[in-house]
Image (cartoon, rainbow, N blue to C red):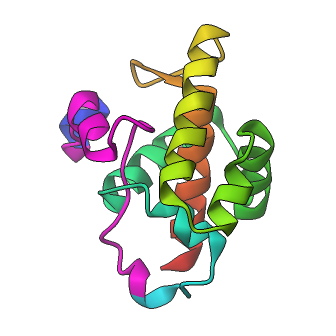
């Protein structure tokens, strides 16, 4: 049974459109706004998603498919190490630069064939890392 049939996840195209073509999948709607402080850099990273629920579900799909046991902190550290300039852009609350850093890293991943296959989808390593972090973060923040 496909994940899309079970959870009614939107298509990759609609997800990309919702994200402005930066990453692959989305996460708001879990009541995060009340649970997090505005100063939290991780919260600012999750702002790139227009649909937090979708990002959470897809992030958990990535985690389960990869068998990842990483913590939220480990996922954050991996993402910051993989995407040059991302931590600085997040710290400066510059959402436009965050999107640019992610887009550049995602494009580089595809050029370098740094991809993973999850439930029939081909994701860049950056997209998978972003979703892993987002799912872990949202899981511990709700």
Q: Quadrant of residue 27?
A: bottom left
Q: Residue at x 30, y 70 (%)?
A: 29
Q: In percent of the image, x 39 and y 18: which residue is there? A: 120
Examine the rendered structure and indicate whether residue 94 appears above or below residue 109: below
48 on left or right of 7: right
Q: Is residue 103 visible?
A: yes
The residue positioned 55% from the left and 61% from the top of the image is 94
- Depth order, front residue of 134/18: 18
Residue 86 lies, in percent from the top left, at 68, 50
Rendered position, 70 above or below 117: below
- Between 75 and 68, the residue placed more toward the observer is 75
Q: Position of residue 135 (x, y in %)?
A: 52, 57
Above or below for 130 versus 48: above
Q: Nearer the viewer, residue 129 or 83?
A: 83
The answer to whether residue 1 shows anywhere in this view is no
Residue at image position (41%, 90%) is 34
Q: Tell me where the magenta segment starts and ends, as one range.
A: 7-33
């Amino acid at each position: 049974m496909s994940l899309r049939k079970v959870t009614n996840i939107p298509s990759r195209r609609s997800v990309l459109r919702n994200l402005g073509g930066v990453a692959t999948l989305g996460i708001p709607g879990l009541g995060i706004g009340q649970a997090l402080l505005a100063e939290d850099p991780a919260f600012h990273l999750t702002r790139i998603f227009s649909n937090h629920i979708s990002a959470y579900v897809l992030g958990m799909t990535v985690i389960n498919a990869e068998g990842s046991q990483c913590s939220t902190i480990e996922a954050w550290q991996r993402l910051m190490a993989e995407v040059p300039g991302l931590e600085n852009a997040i710290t400066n609350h510059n959402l436009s630069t965050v999107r640019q850093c992610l887009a550049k890293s995602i494009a580089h991943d595809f050029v370098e064939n740094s991809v993973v296959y999850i439930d029939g989808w081909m994701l860049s390593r950056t997209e998978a890392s972003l979703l892993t972090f987002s799912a872990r973060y949202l899981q511990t923040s709700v």
